[in-house]
Image: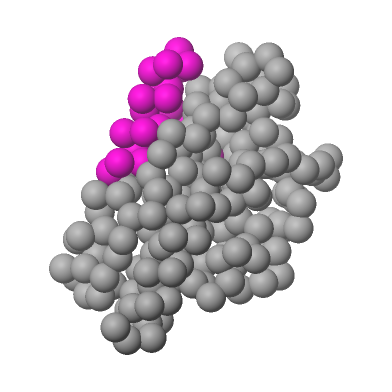
Amino acid sequence: MGKAMRLFSILLVVITASSGCASTSEVQPESVVASPSCPSLPVSVGAFEMYERRKLEAPARGDAFGFTDGSTDRATVFLYPLQDRPAADRAQDMVETEGAAWVAAFPIGVERGWYDAYEVAFADPKPIVLADRMIPGFAGGVPTRKDGSISVEVLYLFAVDGCMLKARGSLEGGHWMDSLFPKFAQDLAVAVATQEPPSE
């Protein structure tokens, strides 16, 4: 087994073991309005700072936001309204369905030459339980290999106040254990969910 494949196998085990960690952190009070139908989005969460904002093209609605913690990690966050305001149990089904569609796209990436190989480390329901509510959620992590280099594609999805919050990252395989991205994604969901909902 070559060095890259050994790292690929070891990384898969490490990521699977790490996927259950969750915590929250304080956020700065500054925020931006992503959509009139959605809660505002903080410009800072822990070590991550917002550095860009761009409008999503039709048929998608809402904005995309870039966050960085100063490392090589880059997080892209999407916040857009759902077509209706689903109940919590149906919202959980919705985030899991969208997460499953993300996982199902990796074979297409191999066919198109984006990756040489991939392995799903975890793709699980990831609701966050607060004192007064549950935030429906999903988390997925997929190590990929391309030309001997390994990276980890990560996705966190949350349904918050009738909106979909999506945090997506591409992390270097060699420093997964040091990445703050999983914590950032979950802390961001808590920060968005605990704000006052937008007025009708």
Q: Residue at x 48, y 58 (%)?
A: 15
Residue 71 percent across, percent down from the top left: 67, 72
Q: Is residue 154 visible?
A: no
Residue 52, image quadrant: bottom right
Quick check: 85 left or right of 66?
left
Residue lying farthest to the front in this orientation: 1
Residue 114 percent across, percent down from the top left: 28, 72
Query: Which residues are drawn in magenta?
Result: 78-101
Q: Judge by depth and name the residue closer to the eye, 183 or 101.
A: 183
Which colouring convention does the figure follow? one colour
Q: Residue at x 26, y 70 (%)?
A: 117
Residue 27 lies in the magenta-colored region:
no
Q: Is residue 133 visible?
A: yes
> For the C terminus, which image quadrant?
top right
Residue 12 percent across, percent down from the top left: 41, 62
Residue 157 percent across, percent down from the top left: 47, 39
Q: How many marks?
A: 0
Q: Judge by depth and name the residue closer to the eye, 2 or 99.
A: 2
Quick check: 72 left or right of 118?
right
> For the N terminus, which image quadrant?
bottom left
